[in-house]
């Protein structure tokens, strides 16, 4: 018997709905539905929680092949979180590398954010705040990889893409194409990774 069938039987024996099981495991109902339909496996921590909840061993829940698949899925998820976190931290390079254009007489110079002086202070502050938010979010992704919070697990990649998109929009609207191109490059890689994992 496969894991998904065992999970359905165990849940029904307790008389729980998918929603109730999801609340007990601190995951989304969609995750439980995905597991029960055989479209995926829970991570190792969720497997331990399921085993504890139903007073069975992880070995009783999964066959050897299923355990390998679950471990592989978790490893891919953690690798993806590390890559997203590193890309968000890479936005910090915008503060130090010459990605910003500044007019000096008849010429345009490439300067770092800190050397940028011919723009309104509010715009420079917005750039710094945006980059700082991206870097802090990247650090949070790296530090909180093992957090079993369902909101964080489901939405950290989406939040990363949204922050990246806002930065791209602000840089392009304020006529900073090099900084915008750098963020566009990061955004495209993130979107490709998201599409591969869905």
Image (cartoon, rainbow, N blue to C red):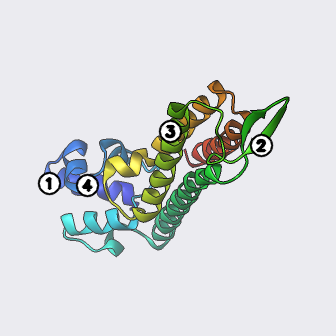
Q: Which residue is mark 3?
A: 125
Q: Is there a contact, CB below 8 Å, between mark 4 and mark 3?
A: no
Q: Is there a contact, CB below 8 Å, between mark 1 and mark 4?
A: no
Q: Which residue is mark 2?
A: 110
Gap between marks 2 and 3, in whole Å? 19 Å
| Residue located 55% across and 52% down the image | 88
In the rendered image, the quadrant that contains the N terminus is bottom left
Q: Position of residue 74 (x, y in %)?
A: 47, 63
Q: Is residue 137 above or below residue 125?
A: below
SS label for mark 1: helix
| Numbered disc in front, either 2 or 1 | 2
Q: Earlier in the sequence, mark 2 or mark 3?
A: 2
Q: Quadrant of residue 167?
A: top right
In the displayed structure, does residue 81 sit left or right of residue 100? left
Q: Residues within 10 Å of mark 1 (few under 14, many from 20)?
A: few
Q: Which residue is mark 4?
A: 9
Q: Earlier in the sequence, mark 1 or mark 3?
A: 1
Q: Earlier in the sequence, mark 2 or mark 1?
A: 1
* Near-viewer residue (2 or 183): 183
Q: Which residue is mark 1?
A: 14
Q: Residue furthest left?
A: 15
């Amino acid at each position: 018997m496969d894991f998904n069938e065992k999970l359905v039987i165990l849940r029904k024996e307790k008389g729980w709905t998918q929603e109730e099981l999801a609340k007990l495991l601190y995951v989304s109902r969609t995750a439980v539905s995905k597991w029960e339909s055989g479209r995926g496996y829970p991570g190792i921590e969720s497997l331990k929680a399921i085993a504890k909840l139903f007073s069975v061993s992880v070995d009783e829940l999964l066959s050897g092949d299923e355990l390998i698949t679950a471990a592989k899925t978790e490893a891919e998820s953690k690798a993806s979180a590390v890559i997203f976190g590193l890309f968000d931290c890479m936005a910090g390079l915008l503060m130090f590398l010459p990605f910003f254009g500044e007019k000096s007489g008849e010429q345009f110079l490439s300067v770092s954010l800190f050397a940028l002086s011919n723009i309104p202070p509010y715009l420079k502050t917005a750039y710094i705040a945006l980059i700082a938010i991206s870097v802090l979010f990247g650090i949070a992704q790296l530090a909180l990889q093992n957090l079993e919070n369902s909101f964080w697990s489901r939405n950290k990649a989406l939040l990363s893409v949204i922050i990246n998109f806002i930065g791209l929009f602000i840089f392009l609207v304020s006529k900073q194409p090099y900084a915008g191109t750098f963020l566009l490059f990061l955004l495209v890689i993130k979107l490709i990774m998201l599409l591969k994992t869905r």
